[in-house]
Amino acid sequence: MESDNLAYMELAIHQAKLASESLEVPVGCVIIKDGEVIASGRNRTTETRNATRHAEMEAIDNLLEMWQRDGLSKAEVAKNFSQCILYVTCEPCIMCAAALSFLGIKEVYYGCANEKFGGCGSILSLHSSCSEPFISDKVPQRGFKCTGGLMASEAISLFRSFYEQGNPNAPKPHRPLVQKKVE
């Protein structure tokens, strides 16, 4: 199973590289059901000019469209999500972790932690089911098993490369950058 996990994370890393090549923050993911890749996604926030187009949301939307075309009922969609495993290069942010919890995904494996926006332990623990509903009693938080650190060094390396070259889509600073003195 460990070799399967690495193989699936390699596919997520490939999606992250595609994101980086498109000048997007390098995050990629794949969704697995019954040992088969059924969806993939990469960050597309800049390309779409939509801040919600994270890799996980792209993959989820691809699946929902496919299942809708296949004529699945809401109950069948819910059952399918409960059998899916997501592999993503970076810990899902709060938005994505909440969406995954609401959808009832079975399990998530991620590469590196997301110290600023992580929804699976770094900032909030939205993967943990709790007796108190997260948003309302009408939208249950189901929770999911979550494991971090899978190929973390590779994921960090992608981020490092992306940010070292400078993010061409980042807003320009309002004031000049302070130059450090070299002694």
Image (cartoon, helix red, strand yellow):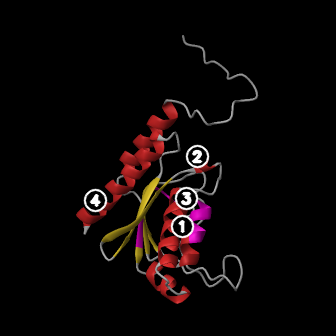
Report helix, strand or loop for mark 2: helix
Three-letter code for the amino acid on which mark 2 is drawn: Glu
If you read the primary sequence from the N terminus, does the residue marked by circle 1 or circle 4 appear first? 4
> Real-space Cα distance between discs 4 and 3?
25 Å
If you read the primary sequence from the N terminus, does the residue marked by circle 3 or circle 1 appear first? 1
* Eye-nearest disc, 4 or 3: 4
> Marks 2 and 4: CB-CB under 8 Å?
no
> Real-space Cα distance between discs 1 and 4?
23 Å
If you read the primary sequence from the N terminus, does the residue marked by circle 1 or circle 2 appear first? 2
Q: Residue at x 48, y 87 (%)?
A: 76
Residue 47 is labelled as: 2
> Marks 4 and 3: CB-CB under 8 Å?
no
Report whether residue 88 is seen. no
Q: Residue at x 49, y 76 (%)?
A: 69
Residue bearing the label numbered 1 = 61
Residue bearing the label numbered 3 = 122
Q: Which region of the structure is painted magenta?
A: 85-99
Residue bearing the label numbered 4 = 7
